[in-house]
Amino acid sequence: MAKIRSELRFLLNGEAVALSSVKPDETLLDFLRLSRSLKGTKEGCAEGDCGACTVLVGRLSAGKLVYESVNACIRFLGSLDGTHVVTVEHLAGVGGKLHPVQQALVDFHGSQCGFCTPGFVMSLYGLWMRSPDPSNAEIEKALQGNLCRCTGYEAIMRAAHAISTYGKAAKDPLVAERKAVTERLTSLHDGARVEIGSGQHRLVVPADVDDFAALREAEPNATVVAGSTDVGLWVTKHMRDISPVIFIGGLEGLQSIAEDNGAIIIGAGVTYTEAFKVLSGRIPALGSLIDRIGGEQVRNMGTIGGNIANGSPIGDTPPPLIALGATLTLRKGKSRRTIPLQDFFIAYGKQDRQPGEFVESVSVPVPAGDEKFAIYKVTKRRDEDITATLGAFLLKQAGDGTVEKIRIAYGGMAATPKRATAVEQALIGKPWTEETVLAAMERYAGDFSPLTDMRATAAYRALAAKNLLLRFHVETTGAKAPVQVSRERAA
């Protein structure tokens, strides 16, 4: 058993913090504002949507210090052991002047009421450090999770382009002090399990994956928190008691991603941001989908394994992974079993997971050269919105043009992510023609009975699902023009 430490340790701006009393559901935002009087970090939505609470969190990844923007409103304090939290108060320019990001926003009139401005500053700060001369697309991606009601964004875009004229990113304190901060964070990683509180009212940070497996087996009813992009809302919106909590976001043993024998094996703790780096190159459609999951802050926190384990019928990653034929590795103690991902989802809120068992990894086959794969996500707004319905399609045609293999999976159409097996059977062995597709579309009623909710009516979902299949046909039969054109290309 790992040694136990009863303190949570991290760096806050330039200060070392050690806390022996932390509530399992205490958010970073509340800690900053109420305990440290750092009021620059704002509460806007309390659900990771508006970005007013954005801070940077630096963490060690394979020995390298990486800073990422996160939503402090849904980030739990217990997840920060061994990290460096940077708030807007820590920014400073040469000789006490404004930081280059701040000065650019002043000079280009990027702030009006000012409530959202600290969040924009921190998101742009994170972008500037990794890309001092960003493109429009990079800026827009970095700001997907920041909402402003006043400026119309063009002034903020101009400011983002001008930051490097006020200073050099290579000379920024967070860059210049990276070695020293890395050493300080390394010293905090002592290989101990963190336990704070007692009985049901406690939080635990496992020492490693084996320690987590033992904890999970011993306490199958504990709440497991990886990125907290979903669990955070259980607390801030639904006022749920989540104690006791096991925080696993810092376990490097769950953060590996590698390719083996034609499949990409993704650890359950791999974030959307980390997954994008690999998937966008090997399975481009998955990369494009990840770009539309939440904002940058959510993608830096949320994990692939968490999206699967939560079992939501509108989770974005399960349908395409099911269409690709992904398999899931589940672990309980020292035992493991592997099942097809589609079999993991049994009913609403129910998955094939035994008490004490957890999702360890998912294996995703890379489509073969003769297979066509696409994902279509339908939302009310393009970016940072929850899915109304999502369809994923994998097609292989025989030499004579007939459908040799097709896998179709949807989210938002049933109580779980689900394959359209009746539609698939109507297509197998048939010529891949519009007539065949139109006939198969009538079989959707046998596969799905969607519900009406705030995101879409049942009739809309049913029609959209059919039309996504028709769109897939258009895009795989030599359409002369792309069905969807990006804003940059349109301009």
Image (cartoon, helix red, strand yellow):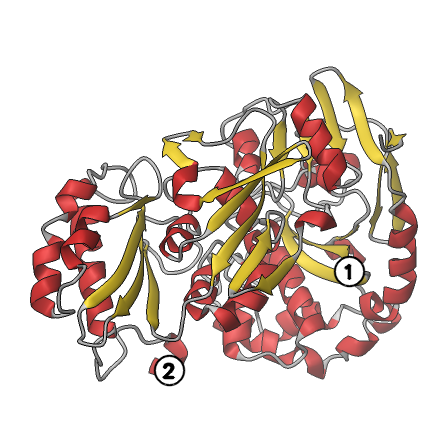
Q: Is residue 272 visible?
A: yes
Kindly identify the amino acid type of the residue bearing the numbered disc 1.
Answer: Ala
Which residue does the image show at 62% across and 59% down from the upper left?
A: 257
Nearer to the camera, 339 or 345: 339
Mark 1 or mark 2, earlier in chain: 1
Circle 1 sits on which residue?
62
**Which residue is the extreme one toward the top?**
199
Q: Is residue 114 visible?
A: no
Circle 2 sits on which residue?
489
Spatial CA distance of label 1 from label 2 is 37 Å
Q: Quadrant of the C terminus?
A: bottom left
In x, y percent, where is residue 264? 54, 61
Nearer to the camera, 116 or 212: 212
In x, y percent, where is residue 283? 46, 68
Q: Is residue 439 above or below residue 335?
A: below
Label 2: state its secondary structure: helix
- 4 vs 373, left or right, is right
Residue 155: mark in rendering:
none
Which residue does the image show at 63% across and 80% down from the upper left?
A: 162
* Neighbourhood count class around disc 2 (C-alpha, 10 Å): few under 14, some 14–19, many 20 upward: few
In x, y percent, where is residue 435? 7, 66
Q: Quadrant of residue 466?
A: bottom left
- 440 vs 207, left or right, is left
* Neighbourhood count class around disc 1 (C-alpha, 10 Å): few under 14, some 14–19, many 20 upward: few
Q: Quadrant of the N terminus?
A: top right
Q: Is residue 116 above or below residue 345?
A: below
Q: Nearer the viewer, mark 1 or mark 2?
A: 1
